[in-house]
Image: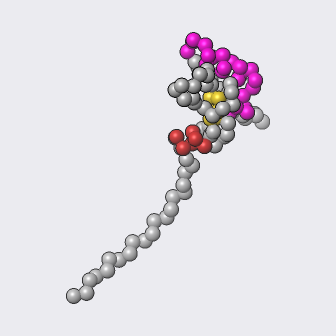
């Protein structure tokens, strides 16, 4: 007895791929320590200050303010906050362009 072949299903259209998100995006942004310029983080035995990290590359619109977009005053304030004893507020946001009224 001959086996019957199943009818072929039509191919599904491919969905457009989304950009990397989450941890993949974080690694793509190349986070660096503002104080030293070294990659973000430190090993357990390393004798250096707590890092103040910001991304060095923009990957998407969700990327926080990069080191190049921060002014020297903002960087200095961020360094002070990270080494101080008070709670840190991360208000380093990019300003959105305001629409002009016609």
Above or below residue 93? Residue 84 is above
Q: Which residue appears farthest toward the top when viewing the image? A: 85
64 and 43: which is toward the camera: 43
Q: Please check the rendered image and state whether residue 79 is part of the magenta-colored stretch, yes or no.
A: yes
Would you say residue 30 is visible in this rendering?
yes
Above or below residue 49? Residue 102 is below
95 and 21: which is toward the camera: 21
Q: Please check the rendered image and state whether residue 101 is part of the magenta-colored stretch, yes or no.
A: no
1 and 16: which is toward the camera: 1
Q: Which residue appears farthest toward the left when viewing the image? A: 1
- The residue at 75%/26% (across/down) is 71
Magenta range: 66-87
Provide residue 56's location: percent of width, then percent of height: 67, 36
Provide residue 97's location: percent of width, then percent of height: 72, 34
Left/right of residue 23 with respect to residue 30 in the rendered view: left
- The residue at 61%/16% (across/down) is 83
Left/right of residue 95 with respect to residue 27 in the rendered view: right
Q: Which residue appears farthest toward the right when viewing the image? A: 102
């Amino acid at each position: 007895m001959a086996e019957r072949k199943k009818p072929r299903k039509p191919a599904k259209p491919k969905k457009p791929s989304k950009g990397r998100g989450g941890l993949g995006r974080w690694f793509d942004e190349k986070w660096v320590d503002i104080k030293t310029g070294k990659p973000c983080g430190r090993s357990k035995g390393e004798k250096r200050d707590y890092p103040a990290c910001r991304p060095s590359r923009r990957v998407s619109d969700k990327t926080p303010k990069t080191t190049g977009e921060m002014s020297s005053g903002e960087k200095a304030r961020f360094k002070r906050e990270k080494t101080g004893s008070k709670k840190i507020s991360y208000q380093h946001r990019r300003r959105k362009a305001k629409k002009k009224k016609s």
